[in-house]
Image (cartoon, coloured by chain):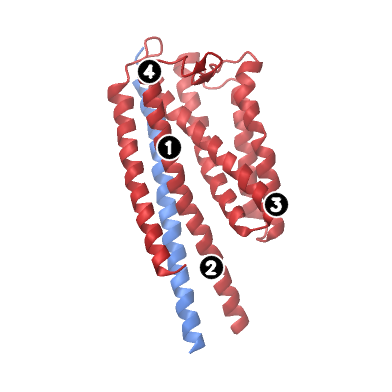
Chain colours: A red, B blue
């Protein structure tokens, strides 16, 4: 990387940090000050504004893993493997947050932390698949075979996501049916202020994804640079 | 229904999780940058 490119990317990430911070502040203000308290569930319903964006972020991250894994298998370029790995790690972090915030929301509403219904179980399976993806990458030696195995797992794991989405429609579950994208139309199952707040929160989490991706990808590239310098040192000595 | 405790717990997990992850990312980046600098120095010393 030359100095000019580094300076440019530093400036871009600086703008992204500020933008993400500001959108998060607006989202927090909307969640705690703007949106009215839901009548049946009370204040605990506000968990929705962090639970759904966390789920969105993890699904989006796994979608990027899926796309980048296909591109890696097709083009055999290390760049795509880096993007897939970085995105999988972020996806697992936010999928974990979904599996934590979900039961916290469920306890006062359903009276139980967890039920083995289709939506919850398939989300847990998704989390386990991508934890396995990260373990595979950590336990096997670096090289194209590791990247190939990981890419296959990254593609297979994503196939679970449509199943998670439709599970609440195909089976009778404890988990509520989709309200934002429902059969009645976009946002028809929700009040406008709730929809706006959720939209702002979704924007904030999406920006956070790009910020974290930038950092994670940069790290992987630094690791590659270190490895190549180590090899250079080994051959020169 | 007042369930502020649950609302607080969910927010604490999400924000705590995000802040901890960002912190570990920063730490990892700092360590990698240090390693890279050290390696570059060693290589330039060896080539002299």
Question: Which of marks 2 and 1 precedes in the sequence?
Answer: 1
Q: Residue at x 72, y 57 (%)?
A: A145
Cα separation between marks 1 and 4: 20 Å
The residue indicated by pointer 3 is A73
Cα separation between marks 3 and 1: 29 Å
Q: Residue A17: image x %, image y %?
A: 35, 48
The residue indicated by pointer 1 is A205
Question: Chain under label 4?
Answer: A
Q: Do tags 1 and 4 sit on the same chain?
A: yes
Q: Residue B15: image x %, image y %?
A: 38, 37
The residue indicated by pointer 4 is A192
Helix, strand or loop at label 3? It is: helix
From where the camera sits, is residue A117 visible? no
Question: Which of marks 1 and 3 precedes in the sequence?
Answer: 3
Crowding at dot 2, Cα within 10 Å, few <14 / some 14-19 / many 20+, comes out as: some
Cα separation between marks 3 and 2: 23 Å
From where the camera sits, is residue A84 visible? yes
Compare residues A42 and A113 and report the one nearer the observer.
A42
The residue indicated by pointer 2 is A225
Question: Which of marks 2 and 4 precedes in the sequence?
Answer: 4
Q: Residue at x 46, y 24 (%)?
A: A104
Question: Which of marks 2 and 3 precedes in the sequence?
Answer: 3
Q: Do tags 1 and 2 sit on the same chain?
A: yes
Compare residues A39 and A136 and report the one nearer the observer.
A39
The mark total stands at 4
């Amino acid at each position: 990387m030359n100095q000019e490119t580094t300076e440019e990317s530093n400036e871009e990430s600086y703008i992204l940090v500020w933008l993400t911070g500001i959108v998060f502040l607006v989202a927090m203000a909307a969640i705690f000050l703007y949106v009215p308290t839901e009548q049946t569930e009370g204040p605990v319903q506000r968990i929705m504004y962090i639970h759904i964006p966390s789920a969105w972020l993890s699904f989006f991250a796994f979608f990027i893993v899926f796309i980048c894994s296909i591109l890696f298998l097709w083009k055999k370029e290390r760049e795509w493997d880096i993007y897939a790995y970085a995105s999988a790690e972020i996806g697992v972090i936010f999928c974990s947050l979904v599996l934590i915030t979900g039961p916290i929301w469920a306890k006062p509403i359903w009276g139980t932390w967890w039920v083995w219904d289709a939506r919850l179980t398939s989300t847990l399976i998704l989390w386990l698949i991508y934890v396995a993806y990260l373990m595979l990458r950590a336990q096997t030696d670096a090289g194209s075979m590791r990247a190939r195995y990981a890419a296959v797992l990254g593609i297979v794991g994503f196939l679970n996501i449509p199943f998670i989405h439709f599970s609440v429609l195909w089976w009778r579950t404890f988990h509520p049916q989709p309200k934002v994208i429902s059969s009645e139309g976009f946002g028809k199952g929700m009040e406008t202020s709730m929809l706006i707040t959720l939209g702002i929160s979704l924007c904030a989490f999406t920006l956070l994804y790009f910020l974290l991706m930038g950092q994670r990808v940069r790290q992987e590239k630094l690791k590659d640079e270190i490895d190549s310098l180590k090899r250079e040192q080994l051959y020169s000595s | 229904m007042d369930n502020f405790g649950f609302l607080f717990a969910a927010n604490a997990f999400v924000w705590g999780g995000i802040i901890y992850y960002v912190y570990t990312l920063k730490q990892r980046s700092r360590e990698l940058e240090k390693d890279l600098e050290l390696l570059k120095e060693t290589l330039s010393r060896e080539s002299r």
